[in-house]
């Protein structure tokens, strides 16, 4: 059943920022206004909902933001049910729901990744409010959608970085290890690694063997190659680490490097790319350098692909709201934007399958994936 055309919807952006957030805000807002809704922008994610901070979004506010990076609403990683409030962490779900009702919202549109999907679904279940989720993350790891917005832009940035590393690597006969984001999945590293022509690509879904990597790099050197590029996803693990974690029941590596100072011992987590570069250099005798792209991958304007995708997702969201279709994620299936029940999405991570075509493509162009010599 369609909701009232003089209703009101709220929009918030949660989790890490990424290119395309403003484009989606524009798509949702303009689509909603087309159907006669008023639109409220909630500032700084779920914290803004709890603190009742919001601004009206009209045509003037969303005009000209399609090409801009970041989010005009701001974002945060705060969760309504576990929100830092001063020196305490409190369950603010009730306050969030109360503020939703005080704003007379017909639906809360949440732009975010896996965590946002879970938080939106929890608000719906606990508070009985209408929510709608749009899949945002450069990691591309949201379940039940072919792609998330922000991924293409981040992959383009990472690919360009790898392109640039080729010239400095070949000038100095070096191995350059480039660390790429992606959390616990390898979509971003695998896609940009293939597109950028990386010689070794390491992703979390395929535990790596350093001896295999070293042999592959030495084989390249013997064949006359002047350099090698190693693309490393931030969440990778070696075969030995996977075995040790399985034996101890540990889910994530907690590796530390020790620095001694006059004040005592300080423990600092060593970046995975740094450790891999150091061990590659020890095994091959070839000079290795590290580049970590970090938050550069999240910044800047969205690609044309993401601008189109964001506009389609946003307007589809407004269409579903006008139809009274709530508590879903707007996912991408083939060429269509379709509603997916949130219970099929919340808490589920989309990993790179072992038989994914990108894996086969990488192997066919002699890319080492860390498990066998290319």
Image (cartoon, helix red, strand yellow):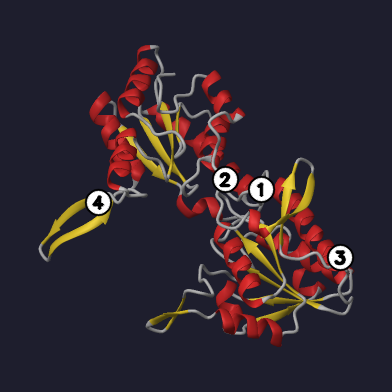
Name the residue carrying label 4: 256
Count residues near mark 3 (Cα–Cα under 10 Å), then give few for <14, some for 14-19, many for 20+.
few
Q: Which residue is depicted at the point 45% across and 51% down? A: 294
Q: Quadrant of the N terminus?
A: bottom right
| Percent x, y of residue 174 | 35, 29
Q: CA distance from mark 4 to mark 2?
A: 28 Å
Q: Is residue 110 above or below residue 374?
A: below
Where disc 1 sits, the SS reads: loop
Count residues near mark 4 (Cα–Cα under 10 Å), then give few for <14, some for 14-19, many for 20+.
few
Name the residue carrying label 3: 323
| Percent x, y of residue 267 | 22, 57
Residue 350's disc number? 2
Name the residue carrying label 1: 144
**Pointer 3 or 2: first along the chain:** 3
Where disc 3 sits, the SS reads: loop
Task: Answer with left or right where residue 314 lies relative to residue 363.
Answer: right
Residue sitting nearer the eye, 306 or 99: 99
Evaluate whether residue 72 shows in this view: no
Do the residues under discs 4 and 3 have CB atoms within 8 angstroms? no
**Pointer 1 or 4: first along the chain:** 1
Do the residues under discs 1 and 2 have CB atoms within 8 angstroms? yes
Do the residues under discs 4 and 2 have CB atoms within 8 angstroms? no
């Amino acid at each position: 059943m369609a909701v009232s055309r003089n209703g009101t919807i709220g929009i918030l952006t949660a989790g890490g920022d990424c290119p395309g957030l403003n484009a989606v805000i524009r798509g949702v807002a303009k689509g909603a206004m087309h159907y006669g809704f008023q639109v409220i922008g909630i500032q700084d994610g779920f914290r803004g909902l709890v603190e009742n901070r919001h601004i009206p979004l009209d045509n003037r506010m969303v005009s000209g933001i399609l090409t801009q990076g970041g989010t005009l609403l701001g974002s945060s990683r705060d969760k309504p049910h576990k929100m830092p409030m001063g020196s305490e962490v409190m369950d603010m779900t009730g306050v969030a729901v109360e503020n939703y009702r005080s704003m007379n919202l017909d639906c809360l549109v949440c732009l975010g990744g896996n965590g946002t999907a879970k938080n939106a679904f929890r608000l719906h279940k606990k508070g009985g409010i209408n929510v709608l989720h749009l899949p945002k993350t450069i990691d591309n790891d949201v379940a039940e959608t072919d792609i998330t917005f922000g991924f293409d832009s981040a992959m383009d940035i990472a690919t360009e970085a790898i392109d640039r590393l080729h010239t400095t690597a070949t000038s100095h006969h070096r191995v350059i290890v480039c660390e790429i984001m992606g959390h616990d999945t390898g979509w971003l590293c695998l896609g940009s690694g293939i597109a950028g022509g990386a010689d070794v690509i390491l992703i979390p879904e395929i535990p790596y063997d350093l001896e295999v990597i070293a042999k592959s790099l030495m084989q390249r050197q013997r064949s006359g190659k002047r350099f090698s590029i190693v693309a490393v996803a931030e969440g990778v693990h070696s075969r030995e680490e996977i075995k040790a974690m399985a034996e101890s029941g540990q889910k994530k590596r907690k590796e530390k490097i020790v620095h001694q100072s006059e004040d005592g011992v300080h423990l600092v987590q060593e970046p995975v790319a740094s450790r891999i570069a150091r061990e590659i250099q020890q095994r091959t005798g070839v000079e290795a350098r590290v580049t970590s792209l970090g938050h550069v991958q999240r910044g800047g304007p969205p690609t044309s692909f993401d601008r189109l995708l964001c506009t389609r997702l946003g307007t589809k969201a407004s269409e579903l709201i006008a139809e009274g279709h709530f508590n879903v994620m707007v996912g991408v299936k083939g060429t269509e934007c379709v509603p997916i029940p949130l219970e099929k999405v919340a808490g589920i991570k989309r990993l790179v399958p072992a038989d994914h075509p990108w894996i086969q493509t990488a192997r066919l162009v002699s890319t080492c994936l860390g498990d066998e010599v290319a």
